[in-house]
Amino acid sequence: MSENGMIQKVDLYQIWEQEEFRQILPFKEYIFDMLIHLDIVSEQRRYDTKTGSRLPIENFFVPCMLTQRNDTDFLKQECTPERTLSLAFVFKGTIIPPALPNRLICACLSMWTLKEYQGRKLMFSGFVGLSFDKEHDIVVCVEGNKILLYLVHKRSKGLIIPDIATSVRDCLFVTLERISEFYQSSIHCKTSSKLPFLTEYSCSKLNCFTSEKKLVSETEECLCKHGENIKNNWRIWNKKKEQKQCDANCQGLSEDALSQIPSNTELLRLSVNCETRMLHDLALHLGMEEMVWSDMVENYPTNTQMVKFLTLMHLKENDEITFTELDNGLREMEITPHTLCVVRQRKQVKSSIPDDILDCIPSDEIVDRLAPLIGKIVFQLGIELGLSVEDLESIKEKCDRDLTAQNKEVLFAWRKDRTVKPTIRVLEQAFVNIGKGARCLKEVVKDVDPNTLKAVEIVTGNAT
């Protein structure tokens, strides 16, 4: 356990059967639930890849038992200045009590998926690597009196979605606040309104930090000792809620981000947020022939969104356009280049679905009931959920003229991929992002009992 930080429930019960622990054995279930509640152990949740049914929990993460330090090169190879944003929670004193980061890591494991790197799980003493989605990874690690948070984009930090950065920062801040308050109460300290830690934000060096106190002022610039304006990074970590338009200080996509070829998901976001005529004119300005556009309109006469997306895909596949070409085209047409900023935005979801339902993986029954309600947006939904164009074309060929069957296949393919936990929350965000709205999902899950959904233990396939 000191190497992988994992233990089976039966092994813990066996330890408690020793003479020294006999008195607590009758209360073993309650005590184990308390260990989970206090973030001392965390469930390793597993799901059947075919049905989405939750499998019996066999292993539990116990970060406090880890002694193995991070000996991978993940930080060096993946957390590069070109792809990473960083902040630090800085505690008073020279070191942090080990129990605090251990509980934080345990809480992180309950929120996000533990990442694997070169065949190894990224969980070590004072270190954890997690996947937020297919584009963003999270690293939490302890150095001296700092808990460092890294948010890493697959291609460029200039494409990090501020909503995601802000939600991750908020989650860790609130969790640290809760853990700190618990420890204060457990040692009979008077609860203080002052937190035992401060937040500092790094520049691109990732080891130069500036206090939040200096950044919250209204001034547009706050330079670090390297001459960088840290305010730009601070705004990404602290995006205002409900902010739909770029603020006055937005500089558009960074040079590094502009050099990237857009992902399919980014092109989908752009197509959803742009007018049809504007995309038509931009495509022709960038060299696409009118006949190609006309053919797409003829193939999808009642699906304008599909035409817009396929137009951008045509430019990507035939001309390998980067964001730079798109940016230049918009400028030459005298259209604001901030149009491209939508690829770094995520639509706000005002959900009325309970959290305990949102955090579950949709069952076969939910997929069966949802599929007929999705309609003609199967392609857009598949792209938003991370499926490849090739996979979606195969599904269309397999289930030709049967929309419900196509939608089912898309949902099953998404659910089978466990790179990131495929929850109802992820599905709800996808519906909102593509403009469908989540009302159909709400109707399907409104009568679902979360306890029943979580308790499904039937195994009909191999576990992941």
Image: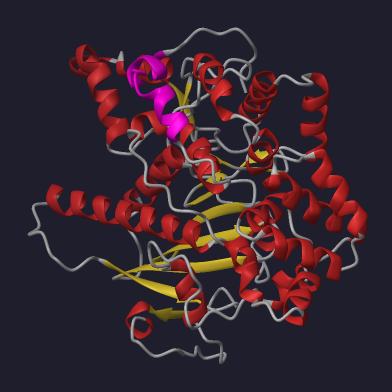
Q: Quadrant of residue 275?
A: bottom right
- Residue at 41% over, 18% down: 453
Q: Quadrant of residue 337?
A: bottom right
From the top left corner, tell me how far across and down residue 449 is, in percent: 33, 18
Q: Is residue 167 above or below residue 240?
A: above
Is 157 inside the magenta-drawn segment? no
Q: Is residue 194 above or below residue 397?
A: below
Q: Is residue 71 left or right of residue 189?
A: right
**As rendered, which of 285 and 74 lies closer to the eye?**
285
**As rendered, which of 86 and 351 lies closer to the eye?**
351
From the top left corner, tell me how far across and down residue 398 is, in percent: 81, 20
Q: Quadrant of the C terminus?
A: top right
- Residue at 42% over, 35% down: 62
**Residue 158 visible from this viewpoint:** no
Q: How is the image coloured?
A: secondary structure
**As rendered, which of 208 and 350 lies closer to the eye?**
350
Q: Is residue 256 left or right of residue 456?
A: right
Range of the magenta residues?
439-455
- Residue at 77% over, 61% down: 280
**Residue 14 visible from this viewpoint:** yes
